[in-house]
Amino acid sequence: MKLTELHIKDYNQFEDFKLDLTYPKGHPKAGQALDKVCFIGQSGTGKTSLIELLRKTMFTISSERVLNALLDKKNNECTVLGNEQLNDIEFSRNGISIKLDQEINFTFDRYDDKNDFSNNGESFVLKAIGLNKDIVNLLSNKSKIFYYPYDISYSSNIQLVNNDFIPLLLDTTLYDFSKLSLQNSWSFINEKIIKDRELEIKKSLEISKALQNPKLTNEDILKAREEFFNWRKNSPNPIVDLAEKFLDRILNRFNLKVKTELDFERKEDIETIKIQTRQGEDIPFDALSTGTKQVILTALPLYGLKPEKAIILFDEPERSLYPDIQKEIVDFYTSMAKDSQFFFATHSPLIASSFEPWEIVELKFNEKGKVYQEKYYEGENHVDNYTINPQYLTWTGILQKVFDLEQESNPLRDRQLIELATLESKLKHNSLSLEKKKETFEKYQKLATLLNWELK
Amino acid sequence: MKKIDKSVILSTAYKEWEENLEAHQHPHPAYNSSKGMFYHDIIMNLYHCQNGLCAYTEKSLILTGLENHCWNQEGRYSADLPSHFGELEHFDESLKSNKGWLWDNLFMVDGKINRKKSSKGIDNILKPDLPEYDPFLLLSYDGKKHIFFANTQNTDLTEEDIKSINDMIDILGINYVKDWRRKEITSRIKALEFGLEPVPLTEYPTAFEMTKRNLGLV
């Protein structure tokens, strides 16, 4: 289930704010929901608010109880008491409608019964258009929400078991990573590793037993071995798969890798992920950098749960990551949940460079202080009418054209460029003595190096 | 940075007032920008003299409202101030306190440049309305870096002059717009190189002219 449209009538700095979340005309996926969306904009324009809002709305309509209540009511409309079960949702001032990719609309409107003292002001009227039993089943069974806020806490306390973690509400699957611990993240993989190990032992025993059969021919033995290897090939060890396909791509940059040779001698051997240097030296989790922990802890649940048709929300995925990782992190996450819809909020031009222009939602303030979306196309929303493509721009280009940075550098560079041009002009046009010319050229070369100015 | 002719006075009421203050050596009323009596008159007269361009960067600051009919018989600007991106600038900041409304010291500039300049010292060598100011004698344009720099080929300029000019280029923020300037000029130079008539360029006339001369296209 993916969002195709979001309309906010009145919510904080948003007023009659509408987002078309489909691919434009002329695109191979024209009209379909965007696979990924990137919110950018100056601080205060509401990037985090949008991520939060999506979490809340999707969280609500993934609740089987809410959906069944809607289905039973006349016109599929009901009042939801915020303080009853959705206690972290504040829709009282909202007027929000969302459209999903199966022609279903949900609207959230304020509940304004002044005579009703049974609610604490957090309740709202929810209405669905196009809802039926199949959709209810689809939404409540398939729709998962992954929420990675900007202030993820990377707890390394592997003893801590957060029982609230999955799921937060009995009938809704919201994976809220506000309090992410290694134990939580690893638990999604651990189970798979144990099952894999059990299966491997079972298969080994089967071969061993077969070998003890005196009637077995060499051909039978080879066949049994081949079957075992085929099974291993088609069902790779999860930790090897995780390392080779995903984590090591990033960890190798930090001179690290996932330890894939697990001993299974003690309980602790598989209690948590093991990280080692590329040279094979084990590194305790606490000794890892914040960026490394972030990559590992955010990736483990995605790999372990392999979400399908989920809504995955990332606020500031660039935190603590060096530029070379930032430019790859979006592909890294999206490759782990291919049929899901991702929403990112970022300040990073490197993150933005991973998106097609129609996947970028740039938020700006208008003269009245309300937020609008800056359009990257002129006329009809068609791929041919786009004038900005972050994937085609240099980093400076993205900073200037997408992030509206007016200057390409510190103003001190401009002053030194004047100096460089002056030296160049003197060398080219002025009649300098050989000694003076050599001295000027040396100065010119030195300055060109400092300015990273390519001599042509 | 074009030479600016400020002898065309449309704001005659303001000019009479200013000349009267100067003649009697009276201190000017405190400069308080938009609260000044002739604020709009000065702005629109300056835009008229500067063809709507920033005095330093030649970036376009105003598109409409430069028509003469907006001035009444009393020599006042009688229409609403049109939408524009400029700020009234005191070339020599030190005159702002006592001679804040001095016509000779005022220019319209891009607001962002104005704020950058305010705290720095000033040299009249690049004052664009002085009779002796000639951009083609004092400045050169580097068509690769898209920046202005001192004209080292002018043998009348001393090393000290060259340094002063380069410093003033930086202080006035003349190269602040180099990225916009590069875009506008490059596409037109390409058209000329391909034998096409370029789209008329309303901004950056000095840089465009110098680029054409450097490339032998005029």
Image: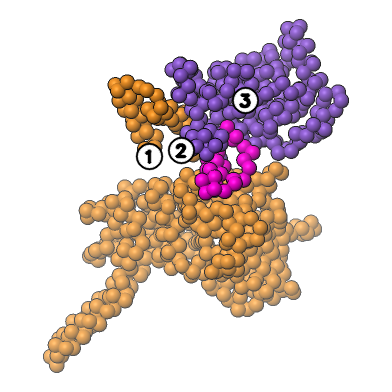
| Figure check: A221 above or below A61 | below
* Chain under disc 2: B
- Label 3: which residue? B3
| Figure check: A21 above or below B57 | below
Q: Who is closer to the viewer here, A263 or B146?
A: B146
Callout 3–callout 2 Cβ contact below 8 Å: no
User: Mark 3 or 2 closer to N-term?
Assistant: 3
* Chain under disc 1: A
- Label 2: which residue? B144
What kind of element bears circle 2?
loop
The residues bearing labels 2 and 1 have C-alpha atoms spaced at a distance of 10 Å
The part of the chain drawn in magenta is B181-206
Whether residue A161 is visible: no
* Mark seen at residue A456: 1
Inspect the image, locate mark 1, and give the three-letter code of the amino acid beneath it.
Answer: Lys
What kind of element bears circle 3?
loop
Q: Which chain is orange?
A: A
Q: Is residue A27 left or right of residue A12?
A: left
Q: State the residue at coordinates (33%, 30%).
A: A446
Q: Which chain is purple?
A: B
What residue occupies the far top of the structure in this picture?
Answer: B24
Q: In the picture, residue A7 is in which quadrant?
A: bottom right
Q: In the picture, residue A330 is in which quadrant?
A: bottom left
Callout 2–callout 1 Cβ contact below 8 Å: yes
Q: Badge 3 local density, few (<14 within 10 Å), some, or many (20+)?
A: many
Q: State the residue at coordinates (50%, 32%).
A: B141
The residues bearing labels 3 and 2 have C-alpha atoms spaced at a distance of 24 Å
The picture places residue A11, in percent across and down from the top left corner, at 68, 52
Magenta stretch encompasses residue A361: no
The picture places residue B82, in percent across and down from the top left corner, at 75, 36
